[in-house]
Image (tube, grey):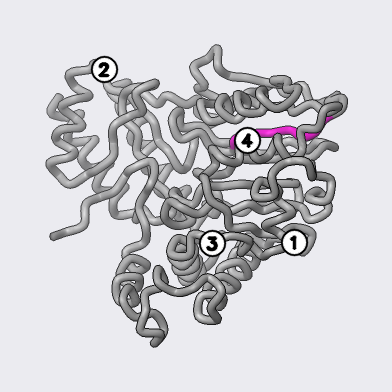
Amino acid sequence: MSKVLNFNAGPAALPRSVLEQAQAELVDFNGTGMSVMELSHRSGAYDEVHVQAKEQLKSIMNIPDTHDVLFLQGGASHQFAMLPMNFLHSNKVGYYVLSGSWSEKALSEAEKIGDTKVVASSKEDTYSHIPKELALDSLPNAAYLHLTSNNTIFGTQWGNFPDVNVPLVADMSSDILSKEIDVSKFDCIYAGAQKNLGPSGVTVVIIRKDWIKEANKAIPKILQYETHAKANSLYNTPPTFSIYILSLVLNWVEAQGGIGAVQRMNEQKANLLYDCIDSSEGFYKGHASKESRSNMNVTFTLPNKELTEKFLKEAKELGMSGLNGHRSVGGCRASIYNAVPLEACEQLVEFMKIFKGKN
């Protein structure tokens, strides 16, 4: 069976070579006679995987020694609550930038825990752009400023991150590892792995070590970042197989030439699709404003519902999976994460041009 062209928003495409290596090692990892899924998380064989994944991520993303890397569970949705539980103390305010559905959900969880304030929002414009006016001159009693770096549903992405003198936190679930960033600007970055890092099941948290010391100690131990930092993410049984696949993905990134090379390829893929949309004489219309377009999720609409359904049906018949837009936006969405090859984007563009010509 030939592999489909996977444009799903998440869980998303994994590199073919990663899947093939995992397949080859599935029942006998490194001569242990056991699958990684069967190894004790306290064993030397698994510990090597765990340590290598952590060190590789630090190297590839140039994570400074001031920050720790944690492998947790529960996805970004768990972090929506865990973050304020640790840092939104009674005399503090959690500041949020609303740029899409996931930032709304993060705010909703924080509101249950402490004082919050929205400093900027593009909701009134159907989240078609990253908020332009940020009220960041004064953030009194700030626990942190929270933003979502890429918005999968609406197809928008931060180009430049704000400079602030309060702890800066970012949910980078859908664009972590897709481009070079200055990790030192952030006190905490968290990301569900299932877009660019690996499969669902593991959540990466990159957090400033000295900030962890300021966290609330009155919450359950399992919910404290300090607990997991002290135990090297081995306080309880981690998602071992997901971390193993993450380590293979990091090997793949290095084989591509590192994060800079991956970024250039992502820009090339996105430009192909946006050029097709922009040159279609209005047949395809992008949802996101040009200055806020995402290189990960390309959202667009067709002239009417009937043509959209026809487009999706014909695309599926050609082996293109996951092009349906989110129900809150409609239309179409091509998620072109790291592992989606350039050839897949080229085939999609060719189909879009042919479909326009026929319709």
| Prevalent SS, magenta region | strand
Amino acid type, callout 3: Thr
Q: Secondary structure at mark 4?
A: helix
* Residue 219 rendering spot, x and y as whole percentages: 73, 41
Q: Nearer the viewer, mark 2 or mark 4?
A: 4
* Residue 188 rendering spot, x and y as whole percentages: 70, 46
Q: CA distance from mark 1 to mark 4?
A: 26 Å
First-in-chain label (2 vs 3): 3
Q: Secondary structure at mark 3?
A: loop
Amino acid type, callout 4: Ala
Q: Nearer the viewer, mark 2 or mark 3?
A: 3
User: Can residue 281 be seen here?
Assistant: no
- Judge by depth and name the residue closer to the eye, 334 or 40: 40
The quadrant in which the N terminus is found is: bottom left
Amino acid type, callout 1: Pro
Picture disc at residue 303: 2
Q: Nearer the viewer, mark 4 or mark 3?
A: 3
According to the picture, the residue beneath numbered tag 4 turns out to be 81
Q: Secondary structure at mark 1?
A: loop
Query: Which quarter of the figure has residue 8?
Result: top left
**In magenta stretch: residue 48:** no
Q: Nearer the viewer, mark 1 or mark 3?
A: 3
Q: CA distance from mark 1 to mark 2?
A: 48 Å
According to the picture, the residue beneath numbered tag 3 turns out to be 237
User: Can residue 227 be seen here?
Assistant: yes
- Judge by depth and name the residue closer to the eye, 241 or 14: 241
**Residue at figure coordinates x 19%, y 25% from the top left:** 309
First-in-chain label (1 vs 4): 1
Picture disc at residue 64: 1
Q: Is the residue marked by circle 3 packed among few (<14), some (14-19), or many (20+) residues within 10 Å?
A: few
